Image (cartoon, helix red, strand yellow):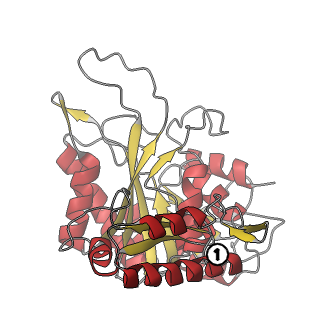
Amino acid sequence: MSVAEELPRGLGPLEDPFVGGDDVSTEFSAWRKSANPDRPLLILGDSSTVLRALPEEAVNMVITSPPYWNQRQYESNGLGLESTPSQFIDGLLGITAELHRVIASDGSFWLNLGDSYFRKSLAGVPWRTAIRMIDEQGWILRNDVVWSKLKGGMDTARDRLANTHEMLFHFVKQPSYYYDTASIRSKPRSSKLVNGAVVSATGVTGVRYKRKIELSTELSLQEKADAMIALDDMLSKISTGEYSDFRMVIRGGGQRVTHSDQDRVSGRAKELRDRGFYFLKYHPDGAKPSDVWDIVPEDTQNRGPNHYAAYPEELCRIPILATCPPEGVVLDPFVGTGTTLLAARSLGRRAVGIDVSSEYLRGAASRLLP
């Protein structure tokens, strides 16, 4: 049965819920034109071979967690069983090269990689891979996210610390790319009026800053007047919601200058020198997430008895929201138990998963079918 044929939330016949072989290109094109956005496409095959069958710029973003080198015996063998870390990276780069072609010009690639030990030394596989992708394939690295898992598995080593983090790299193809920062900001509290005075989301009224300006021995009379005007303007913008909060740094006020107090390095230090003050302005939609994510691994996912490396659905949320447009296409070339596809569907995106293991794909189908 072709994936173009409509099934009730279908992926294909239950006994064979995926496509593969020579029909991949045709089936992918039919799936893209189909009317059921909730139905992911599962493709059986080696990732590098399948990717070569897909058209250029076929998907909006990729997020994946490939098999880690020398850590597990995966069903159907495949990537991760090489003799050395360098051989593993060579194989992985063959796949990232194809992904560079398949991802849209304004798309993103999020790569989750854990490390391994080789001859007693931490092999540095994540960063060795990232650097080669930059140097050899032209990827642009926008973020290196530390996934803090908060807990680890059994670790019997007596001469090193426990390993409880992994890397999640955000790559793009060009400097200008799709990124929806509003969708991932934490929503702030709103400003309000108290006794006729504007109070910011965190309780700033401006009274304290006005007092500091009046008492300053570092500001000239003209600088004091300018600072008062600027402060009133900032409070007005707080009241209209242009900013949710602010901080005012005043020359000689005892506050720490952001980043550097050297005006040749810091624009804010230069502003402090020239004007006597500057503002830190907080976005009305809240703060952006940082590059350290505390996410506990999910131990209870329905992933089957022979797959132990599924990453949590929560790890996919920020990447998909930020870098895949609504109704865009998410691809996972090592789909495993289908966590990426579940996350994509829950966030209103279409999804494609590739895996060399028919057993894993059947497990993914069991999670994705009603």
Q: Secondary structure at mark 1?
A: helix
Is 243 on the left or on the right of 367, as rendered? left
Q: Residue at (36%, 43%) from the top-left corner?
A: 114
In this orientation, which residue lies closer to the viewer: 138 or 66?
A: 138
Please, is residue 142 above or below residue 343 in the view? below
**Residue 338 shows in the view:** no
Q: Residue at (34%, 64%) from the top-left corner?
A: 95
Q: Tell me residue 252's x, y (percent).
A: 33, 63
Query: How many numbered badges does the structure rendering display?
Result: 1
Q: Residue at (47%, 53%) from the top-left corner?
A: 356
Q: Tell me residue 113's x, y (percent).
A: 37, 49
In this orientation, which residue lies closer to the viewer: 138 or 368?
A: 138
Is 72 on the left or on the right of 318, as rendered? left
Q: Residue at (23%, 68%) from the top-left corner?
A: 134
**Residue 310 shows in the view:** yes
In this orientation, which residue lies closer to the viewer: 257 or 128?
A: 257
- Quarter of the image with the C terminus is bottom right
- Quarter of the image with the N terminus is bottom right
Give the residue pinned by disc 1.
238
Please, is residue 58 above or below residue 84 in the view? below
Is 217 on the left or on the right of 195, as rendered? left
Is 270 on the left or on the right of 163, as rendered? left
Q: Indicate the quadrant where residue 234 lies.
A: bottom right
In this orientation, which residue lies closer to the viewer: 352 or 255?
A: 255
Crowd class of label 1 (few under 14; some 14 to 19; many from 20; radius 10 Å): many
Q: Tell me residue 362's x, y (percent).
A: 64, 49
Q: Tell me residue 337's x, y (percent).
A: 59, 47
Please, is residue 306 above or below residue 265 in the view? above
* Amino acid carrying mark 1 in the image: Ile
